[in-house]
Image (spheres, grey):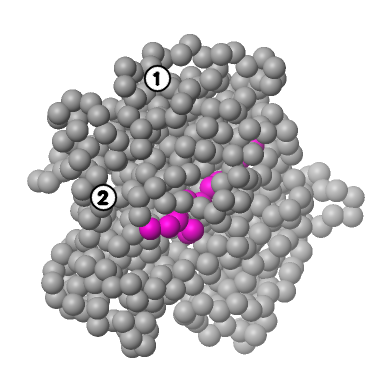
Amino acid sequence: MLVPHGYGTEGRLQLWVGAHGEALPEQLWVRRTLLGVDDLPDGGTCSVDFPVVLDRVAPSLRYTVLLLPVIAGRRYLFSLWATTDKGERELADAECRARPRNLDDGFSVWYGSCFYGNEDKGALGAAFDALPRDCRPDVSFLGGDQVYLDTAVATSGWGFAPIPGLSIIKSLRLAALNSAEGKAELERIFTEEYRSNWSRGLHRLLRSGNHHFLAGDHEFWNDYPNPPGFFWGLRIASLRETWKASARALFDAYQLPAGNASGEFAIGDELAFFYLDTYLQRKEGYNAKFTDDETLQRACDWLRGLTCPGVLVLPMPLLTHWHLRKGGSFIHRFKKSFTAWRVKLGLGDHSLADSSQYQPLVQALHDCSQDVVILAGDVHYSRLARMELNGKQVVEVVSTPLSCLPSAGDKPSTALEIFPDRPITGIRAAVEYLRAGNFRRKILGYISDNNFATLNFSRAENGIHVLVRCWNVNERNAEGSPSPAWEPARFLLRRRTADAVPVATPVPEPVAEPQD
C-alpha cells in the first residue's frame, strides 16, 4: 500500500509504503507523477522515480516513510513499482495534493472516526467514490478507532462474546494469554485487524488525499488506559501491559510512523490547523492528564497565538458532559451519579471534561482571538453546534461512526445548554445546536447512521467561508452521491485583529456553581 501520511516540512510530503508480509522483489521504487503538466517549471519533468527500501519491521508488516519533494498546491499520483521476471509491475497507487500556500483554489477537509470493519461490507469505500469532486479531501483526519482490537479478540477463537468480555470463558482465556504464547496470539489477532482495515475497509479513503491519524481508545481497549469493565481479563495489570505493548507497536507502524501524535500546519497565513492526541499519553483514573504538559502547552499557545481562523482536531468532543459534576435537581443528581458509577466501573467512557487538562484547554480557547472550528468524533453520532465565546465564533463538528459497532450505538447529545459543563471561572457560553444526525432505537439503547464530514474552506472578502457537510455512508441521493446526514451549513470565519475582539454578552451566573 501507499498512504500519503501527513504534510512534511515546507516543500515535502510524507509517503508511507507498506507490505503485509508478502515476498517482494528486491528492487522497488515509487514513481511520483505530476498531474496537470501544462505549466511545469523550467526543466521540470512529469515523472520521477525514487528507490524504496522497506527498512522498518512490525508484526507481519514491512514498511518505510519517504519524504518526497513536491510543489506547493500541485496534485500528484504516486505509484509503487517492482521489477519481476515478467518486467515492471505496478503494485499500488495513491493520489494527493501538496499543501497549498494559500486559499486561492480552496481547501477541502475530511473527518471520520470509529470504523468497525466487520459491519462495513464495502460501504465506506463506495460512499467515498460517490462523493462530489469538490469534496475529495486535500487532507483527511481519521479521528480514532480505526481498528477495534478489543472486539477483534472477543470475536476470535472459542469463547465468543458479542460484547467484549461478556462471557466468563472469554475473560478466563484472556487471562491465560498473559504468556509468550499469548503475546504471539494477540499480535496475530491485532495484525489481522489492521491488515483487514487497511487493505479493504479503509483502503479507498487512504489512497486519496493526505492523512493524519489520531488514536481512539479502541486502538487499545475500551476507555483506554482505564481497566475496561467489559473485559474482565484486562483487570490484570500485567496483561494490560502485554496488550498495550503489542497494540502500540502496530499503531506506531501504521498510524504514527513519523512519530508526530500532535502537530500543526497552516495554509499560508489564512487558515491554521492543530491536531491534538488525547489518548496515547493519557493516564488512568478520574481527573488524570490526557497528554503531556509540553503538548498541552503547545496546543494552548497555538490557540492564544492565532492570527487567522483555526481548526482544532480532536478525537473527542470538547462540548461534553462532566461526569462527576454535582448539584441540580434530584433527577439530575441521580442521572449524573449513575453515569459516574458506570465510568468508575469501566462500563462507560471518561470524557475530556473528566481530565485535569480540560480546564486549561478551554481557558486557552476562551482567550483565543480568532474564530475556531473544532472537529471531533468517538461518541457514535453526528452533530453540529455553535457558540459565541468571548466575542468570537466557535463551531464544533462531530462526525462518527464510519461503521458502527452494533453494541455501542448512541443518539446525538444536545442537552448541554451552557459551555463548559465543568465550571471555569468567567467562562460561560450558550450553546446553539444546529444539526444532528438520524438514529433509531434498538432493544437496548440507540444506533446512529454511519457518517463522515467534509469541510470546504474558501476565501471571502471579510474572512473565510466554510461549507460543512455530513454524509450518510449507506444511502445515496438521486445524483448517486451519498445522502446528507443533515442539511449543509455555511459559516463565515472572521479574521480579527487582537485589539478589535468584541466582548460576548455574558450568560447569567447560576446561584451556586458546584466545584471539584
What residue is at 81 percent from the left and 44 percent from the top? 39
Secondary structure of the residue carrying tag 2 is helix
Secondary structure, magenta segment, majority class: loop
Q: Amino acid at mark 2?
A: Val
User: Residue 284, image x and y in percent?
Assistant: 38, 58
Depth check, front residue: 176 or 328: 328
Examine the rendered structure and indicate whether residue 346 appears above or below residue 515: below
Examine the rendered structure and indicate whether residue 371 appears above or below residue 278: above
Number of numbered discs on residues: 2
Range covered by the magenta-colored residues: 272-284
Q: Which residue is mark 2?
A: 343
Quadrant in the picture for the C terminus = top left
Examine the rendered structure and indicate whether residue 338 appears above or below residue 258: above
User: Residue 214, image x and y in percent?
Assistant: 49, 53
User: Residue 434, image x and y in percent?
Assistant: 37, 23
User: Residue 337, image x and y in percent?
Assistant: 20, 40
Quadrant in the picture for the N terminus = bottom right
Say if the magenta span includes residue 283: yes
Say if the magenta span includes residue 385: no
What residue is at 43 percent from the left and 37 percent from the top? 318
Q: Which residue is mark 1?
A: 430
